[in-house]
Amino acid sequence: MPSSSVILVSKCTVCPEHKSTVKSLKLSVSDLPMLSCQYIQKGVLLTRPPLSLPIDSLISLLKQSLSTALTYFPPLAGRFETDADGHVHIVCNDAGVEFIHARAKHFLVRDTLSPADVHACFKQFFAYDGLLSYAGHFKPLAAVQVTELADGIFIGCTVNHSVTDGTSFWHFFNTFADITKGAKKITKLPNFNRDTVFNSPVVLRVPEGGPKLTFSGDEPLRERIFRFNREAIRKLKCRANNQTQKSTNGQVLDVTEILGKMSNDNWNINNGENGLDNGKITSVLEKYLKNNVSKTLDSETGVPNSATEISSFQSLSAQLWRSVTRARKLPPSKSTTFRMAVNCRHRLEPKLDSHYFGNAIQSIPTVASVGELLSRDLRWCAELLHKNVVAHDDDTVKRGVNDWENNPRCFPLGNFDGAMITMGSSPRFPMYENDFGWGRPLAIRSGKANKFDGKISAFPGRDGAGTVDLEVCLSPETMAGLESDTEFMQYVSGMA
């Protein structure tokens, strides 16, 4: 329900266009732990539709498109039901989802994007604020809120976290947008197969009335979005991989140093110092980058070795971990944890269908002492993350399932010792592909759900091409320290 500063225009239930052929889906080992998490809240900020599509016509179109989309995603229109044995099922009964039309005409798009911190208005553009996923027993499993701004539209999608992970969430959201835009056929159909390693006879016992939120939700927070362009990401990756190589004349070449000098020494390059014109320098560098920039060097041979490559995102995550930990001013002996959610679909053997609908994620914790994390270099930190991610294979996924079956529990979301960071979402999610028919989103924003000191969400940058936006939630004191951290801020290309 919109807050008092947002006017409610209408509210209704939207049901699937056709009856569901899927009857019931049992929640899996990956779905059940999310019952204590709040509903996912993600949305897209769009320009105002053309005059040929007045708001009443748009609302009608969106309702019809949502109804059609739910035909392909019938679990979202269902409800939870716990059977006599304690197993929780999604009953695909076509009960429908909530659709809200709201108005906030006092907000201009530029005003919502201009503050240093994320504008508080976005938290008013989503339904089911604070609702835990267990509430799917008596509440809709999804809701869409369309909020009119003075010169734009915000479409906020709220989905039960025990029904979808990020992959499935954006699959549905993209499909909804495609249908609104006029798609007549959906080529990427969701897969509802439950014959997977995550299917289990084990029951999760919850207290009467359901599980409780595992973090306070009332702590003061600041929320900023830090942008990283392709060049900054490349420099971070080179630094994390210690990418240096000997040239043909025996000199040691540092890729980041070369790139930096090229960008800051235009006169020498453009005027062909040392008898080389700009084209030849560029050609040589491009050839080197093509052959070596994405490969680390074996510590003994100096030969590029892609098997040990630290990824761009691992490099960025490592830098964030170091800088946030430094800003927290923790004692050197204290342990700090960086927790990263990983998609298990492609890690299993055989692989799950890439469009498997539901949760297929596990959390990878990486632990280090504060003293080591800050005294070592970026590569040391990035390697810790890299090794844990690479090691998370089919056997590791199955061990995680067995561990949960031996001790069924809800996911402990939060920062329990003041030294934790939790990374969610992914820059690989197709967030900016949500074109409803009049252009790509101007920005991606989330609601209040599942946010605490140390919660980070990764989004793709709007420019694509390897750019990344990090939505960072920290205590006010820690955020101020991060903003003053020169090692971190040198890579930030913008804030929103």
Image: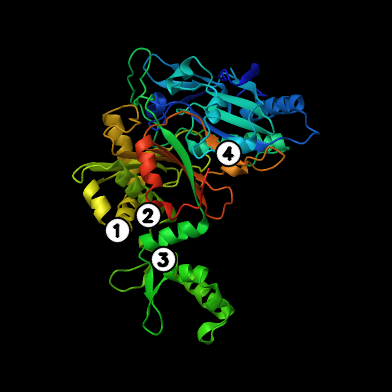
Q: x%, y% of residue 301?
A: 31, 74
Report the label total: 4
Q: x%, y% of residue 387?
A: 32, 53
- N-terminal of the pair, mark 4 or mark 2, is 4
- N-terminal of the pair, mark 1 or mark 3, is 3
Foreground mark, 3 or 4, reads 4
Foreground mark, 2 or 3, reads 2
Which amino acid type is marked by label 3? Lys
Query: In 3D space, how far apart are the residues under numbered discs 2 and 3 (Cα atoms)?
Result: 23 Å
Query: In 3D space, how far apart are the residues under numbered discs 1 and 2 (Cα atoms)?
Result: 12 Å
Decide if residue 391 is on the left or right side of residue 103: left
Regarding residue 314, the answer to whether it shows in the image is no
Q: Residue furthest left?
A: 333
Decide if residue 399 is on the left or right side of residue 313: left
What is the secondary structure assignment of the residue under circle 4? Answer: helix
Residue tagged 2: 487
What is the secondary structure assignment of the residue under circle 2? Answer: helix
In the picture, residue 242 is in which quadrant? bottom left
- N-terminal of the pair, mark 4 or mark 1, is 4
Regarding residue 480, the answer to whether it shows in the image is yes
Residue shown at the point (24%, 46%) measured from the top left? 370
Foreground mark, 1 or 3, reads 1
Foreground mark, 1 or 2, reads 2
Which amino acid type is marked by label 4? Leu
Residue tagged 1: 377
Query: In 3D space, how far apart are the residues under numbered discs 1 and 3 (Cα atoms)?
Result: 19 Å
Callout 1: few (<14), some (14-19), or many (20+) C-alpha neighbours within 10 Å?
some
Residue tagged 4: 113
Residue tagged 3: 295
Residue shown at the point (28%, 32%) measured from the top left? 416
